[in-house]
Amino acid sequence: MLMTTVQLDGDQTENLSCSAGASRQAFGDRVFFAVLTGASLIAPLILLLFVAVLAYGAWPSIREFGLSFLTSSVWEPNPERERYGAFPFIVGTLISATLALALAAPAGIGIATLVNEVLPSRLRGTARFLIEILATIPSVVYGLWGVFVLAPWVSGTLQPALAKPLGFIPVFGPPYEPRNMLCAVLILAIMVLPIIVSVSLDAIRSVPASYREAALGLGATRWEMVRIAVWPPARSGFIGGCILALGRALGETMAVTMVIGNGRRISASLFAASDTVASTIANQFAEAPSDLFTAALIEMALLLFVVTLSVNVIARWLIRPAARTGARP
Amino acid sequence: MSPVYRRWKSRLFLGLMGLALLVCLVPLASLLLTLVVKGGHVISLRFLTAGWQPVGERGGGIAHAIAGSLYLLGVATLIAAPLGLAKGLFLARGDRHWLTGPVRVLLDVMSGIPAIIVGVFVYTLVVRRGGFSLGTGFSLLAGGLALAMIMLPIFARTTEEAVRAIPPSVDEAGLALGLPRRRVVLWIVLRSAVPAVLTGLFLALARVAGEAAPLLFTAFGSNAFPGSPLEPAGSLPQLLFEYARQPFEELVRQAWGAALVLVAMILAVRLLTHAYTRWRYGGHGGHA
Amino acid sequence: MNLMETNLKPPASTPASPARPPRIVVDRLEAGFGRHQVLRSVSLDLPDRAITAVMGPSGCGKSTFIRCINRLHDEVPGAWARGSIAVDGQDLYAPSVDPVQLRRRIGMVFQRPNPFPTFSIYDNVAVGLRLNGTRKRAILDERVEQSLRRAALWDEVKDRLDKPGTGLSGGQQQRLCIARALAVEPEILLLDEPCSALDPVATERIEELLLDLERDYTLVMVTHNIQQAARVADRTVFLLLGELVEVGQTSDMFTNPKDPRTESFISGRFG
């Protein structure tokens, strides 16, 4: 409802027109909405600026290393022969995010289903509240807990329990380090869980009650009802929620930085210290020894930006239809 | 398949879901418990009101970081609130404008940018010396700007929803009184939406108050109380991150105290806004 | 015909006489949205200090018609209008006319009571004056009281002026909206089905109020309620599918409709 005009029909003299010179008010309104529009455009413009600024900052590194930046594992800040490759960090990011999602997705969808389809509505509110708290706790606080509670538990209890029977598999084999990939995976899983649960809940809630009644009317058990009538129509919402969670997991920084051990290498073992793109930036950016080093880190930021951006666009696109037809009153 | 088998299958899977819920509650319970126990030991009036002390000296507190956080959030609000309001109004009352679609999509996308990248971006554009950067160096201002960029999409979205909840008939009633549209939008529609807009602002603040990642290379951190906006500033999340990595028992203790303070502040804001919203809309049963 | 049961407004209160010039003259008014034409060449006169009912089945363009009179129709995206509407001889759609100024002279009350949310009762009435530049508290107080009294609401709300307007009952809210419109001192008051969302008791109070306001204002009221038109209107306009079918003294039209379509509508053969 911005500037509305009454269409002119030039032939007739007794036209009802709202001509521009008629009204100071119309001009004032136009100025007002122009200011509003201008202010609204600032942030989107900044977003477009993001790519330009990051690319500019990363340029020395892009020029120096080209594509080998993505595939090289050498990270050498030695001033005589600086060389940087982000491969281990990229792998670390992908592994931590994927495994976290593999843990959180079934749990999250299960919890959402349970909350909406099984729990009495009295408990429903409580469950939502707990999930809300989970989502509210800052990343650094998760990190603190990860360092002093989760990591000791993983290396003291989980690792011996898994290493004894399964240690011959490289994934559970040495090296055993106190802060490691598994800690990061677990903490990421906990952190993305609320996203998956809340998006899945929205998707499940938008499934019409008549579907459920139809399934129950056919004599389905509650589980069969879920499988037949609830999950299929909610599927795109589930996928959207998971991809949104993936985007979050890829970019999650503080907690991961604190518990992953900053290993800077690729290891088959979950118990080895590793690094992700985000944790490397967080750890080293402020102490970058040279301009090229900074540029390499900015290039990693650019990379992460492009990846999370695409992931988010896909997720939003998937969630959209579910939200449109959703249970809005 | 026998009905008995089907019934047990149903119970099995529902039971698994219940188990998932319980397993997820364990870390939450552990986290909250540790936080309250370890943090509770540290918190005292002195801890909350004293500034930083060198390791080894007794009586150090986190007041400088609390103050820094409040300053940073203040700067972020000063930047994000007007822009968010404009955006929210534009999206909710500029329906026919061809730019509303793109703006909304870009805002959505913006809310998905990892916080650490916002930090790198602000560093490159504002903090760093040289290039086309503003070259402010590590500063309160840069930190506030980074937080504002995270706040903005959240606040704009809630503002849009708040304004959209005001029915168009309100606009028409205002126009019918002989008021120009800008006054109707600003002084009637927006004012009608103020409670919901404020709720959104506080939720956005609660969301960014715990962010450390965008502050690492912008506000950087400081052991002093915040001074000039062009100097580095400390903050609770950043202090937490620093102290947790230190080998000193005393600093780790303080980190737990800071964590409890931070979580308590954020939860308090959330619960208060929640209660306020319920009181407001549960109260006199007015508009939706 | 069930006209015998209809409670016609006594002709004694009909001030319109051929000697007095009409207040509003509509000439070949056409209006619509985009390609959709709603009004087709409507021409008619509306008398001063009288209630004119605009009647017709839903979708016949009643609302569009009165929304052209205060040019609120302009505010809808894609809306257009042709022809002329003159008030006291001046064309409302002349380029020199500022629609914003115009709406201060021509107030409007809507179908659903729409007090401003989160505004107190006082602020609801005062906001029009305030935003038009009246700042003095004494003047505002006086005008608020005057308007609320005029809308027959003062006694019910005078002790809770600072309470939200949305807390009132539906009928009270609608009278609040009338007070709000009266506060900016219009000469003409447009009412778009003001009672359609109200119960019969509240409706009766509003109708009494309209009969009282008629002495000072020119009232144009859209209604699809035939009984209501008969009870309160001096003159009735009957629109069908955007065309003017008949206009005349209410008593004439109800007892002796000239057009067969009017007759069918009055006797209830249209929705």
Image (spheres, coloured by chain):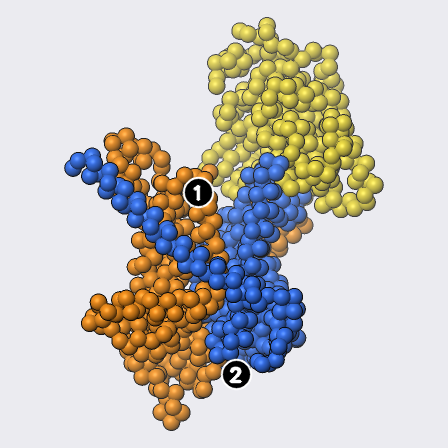
Inspect this view and state whether residue C60 appears. Answer: yes
User: Which residue is rendered at x = 41% and y = 78% of the image?
Assistant: A297
- Amino acid type, mark 2: Gly
Q: Give the answer, above or below, for where C270 lies relative to A160.
A: above
The orange one among the chains is A
Distance in Å between CA atoms under marks 2 and 1: 57 Å
Figure quadrant of the N terminus of chain B: top left
Residue nearer the viewer, A16 or A229: A229
Q: Which residue is mark 1?
A: A123
> Residue A153 location in percent, x, y?
37, 67
The yellow one among the chains is C
Residue nearer the viewer, C187 or B281: B281
Inspect this view and state whether residue B68 appears. Answer: no
The hue of chain B in the figure is: blue
Residue nearer the viewer, B107 or A161: A161
Q: Are marks 2 and 1 on the same chain?
A: no
- Amino acid type, mark 1: Leu
